[in-house]
Image (cartoon, rainbow, N blue to C red):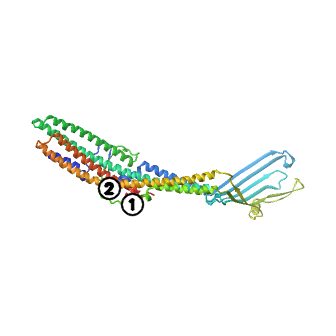
Amino acid sequence: MSKQIFLLTLALAWFTCAPLWAAPQEGTELELALKQAIEMALENNLDIVVARISTQAQEENTFSARGAFKPLLSANFNNLDSRSPANNQLIGAPTLARTTTAYNFSWQQQFSLGTDYSIAFENQRASTNSAFSSFNPLYDTGLSARVTQPLLKNLHLNANQQRVIVAQNGERVARYQFEQQVMDTVRDVHNAYWDLVGSMRALEVAQRSLELAQELVENNRVQVEVGTMAPLDVLEAEAEVAAREEALLLAQEAIERTGDTLNRLINDPESEHFWDMKIRPLDEPAVTAVEIDLEASVRTALQRRPELGQSRTDLDTRHYNVRYTRNQVRPQIDLVGSLLFSGLGGNRIEREGFAGAIIDEIPGGYTDALDQLFGATFRDWTLGINVVYPVGYSTEVAAHAQAQVEVRGQRAAIRSQELVIIQEVRDTARSVETNRKRIDVTRVARELSQRRLEAEQRKFDLGMSTSFMVVQAQRDLVQAAVNELVATIDYTKGLVAFERARGTLLDRDNITVQ
């Protein structure tokens, strides 16, 4: 039985041994360090892909909003050919024939200040058989400019500018959400990796425990045959074997479950062996003491947590909406001005009398119209003020009141979120300290359980104990070993949870989100 105790002791000292779990032959086996698992997750995890696409969509939304301030160049070309019967003598021909060709260009743009301007260059060539025409063909050109400048409402704060600010803040929120998703995925990879390590070590303990129970059965059977033990002791040992076979099955199932979780987090779902990949972890949890400065950790969390970054950005958006809606409550007073230059050209026709025969035709063309246009011989300009003032309780006033309420609500939500984060930092820090102490306590408990089993075995060999007492001592030692294993894994995962609560988990793994 001393050999049996040695085998169990070897299994329980899991943290000093190399991995003993052998992966099944089917599928593909992958030896993987934790750093490699994280790198694979950053490349393949679908949740990160979705968050990345969402960020890109928000970037495009910002570009779209900024497009409102891009200049708009337009052009149109058309030709009209008309034949219509004369319905009175003033038409100038029995059948009026007209051909008109137009080619126009315009440039329009709005600035964030609210200024809106447009420039138009219009050209028309017209020919007709009417006796009342003084030019044939006629070239008519015009160059116009129009400017509208808000003086109160929409000055600096207009609908297009508001859409840009909201889109920019939406892009910032999407980046914070992407960082949060990366952080959560890295945390989940850490946890899944260590859960898989713990499951494999638990399987080793279950295997050794089963072997020891089987050896006890064989030993009891020999003693029954020689008459030094009652058959009941064999039944007790066989019942223990069955119980430990069940524990072994559960341990094997736990390995498959935790392996599936890690596969889902890190592997490419399009890969051939996505669910069949058998991962063999290479890293062991390192139990190192960590000094925690709780106050500094809380300050760091309030500065670094991406969730708070999202909420504070939302608050910035709501502050801007208050300013925007306050501006919209003001009267609309716009300064409006326009300037028009025009020119005419073409073959000038002189007739005898009123609508008489052509007696002379003075050649001309499009250049004559341009000379008049750019010579500023003919011009029109206007300058005025447009005023619009809503009477009574307007929708703008209601929108401003609602924006103020939303700011107060968002401030309260941020404060509540800060309290939750502070509690999370305190809880995870406390958990780290507790789990570190659990490791020491469970190690002592395992050592004492091992000594108790050795003593119980010696008493059993001398006939001073029963098979039941030996089995119970074995159970206690297995449970103590499992408790030590769980405490070590919990401590390792607790450190990850603490870094996640502080918002510094990516720094720990040297990951930069851009």
* Label 1 neighbour load within 10 Å: few <14, some 14-19, many 20+: few
**Residue 13 location (% of width, % of height):** 23, 51
Q: Distance between the residues labelled 1 and 2?
A: 15 Å
Label 1, on which residue? 295
User: Which quadrant is the N terminus positioned in?
Assistant: top left
321 left or right of 380 in image:
left
Residue 474 bears which disc, if any?
none
Q: Which residue is drawn at 16% across and 47% down?
A: 454
Task: Say which of 438 and 105 sits in front.
Answer: 438
Using the image, determine if residue 244 lies above or below residue 48. Answer: above
Q: Earlier in the sequence, mark 1 or mark 2?
A: 1
Task: Say which of 153 and 83 sits in front.
Answer: 153
Label 2, on which residue? 433
* Label 2 neighbour load within 10 Å: few <14, some 14-19, many 20+: some
Would you identify the image quadrant in which residue 288 lies? Answer: bottom left
Q: Could you tell me the amino acid type at mark 2?
A: Glu
**Residue 494 location (% of width, % of height):** 34, 53
In the displayed image of the protein, which residue is found farthest to the top? 231
384 left or right of 292 in image:
right
Residue 50 visible? The answer is yes
Q: Is mark 2 on a helix, strand or loop?
A: helix
User: Which quadrant is the C terminus positioned in?
Assistant: bottom left
**Residue 365 location (% of width, % of height):** 77, 59
Q: Which residue is drawn at 49% across and 52% down?
A: 413
Using the image, determine if residue 43 lies above or below residue 464. Answer: below
Report the label total: 2
Q: Could you tell me the amino acid type at mark 1?
A: Glu
Q: Is mark 1 on a helix, strand or loop?
A: helix
Q: Residue at x 86, y 46 (%)?
A: 88
Residue 30 visible? The answer is no
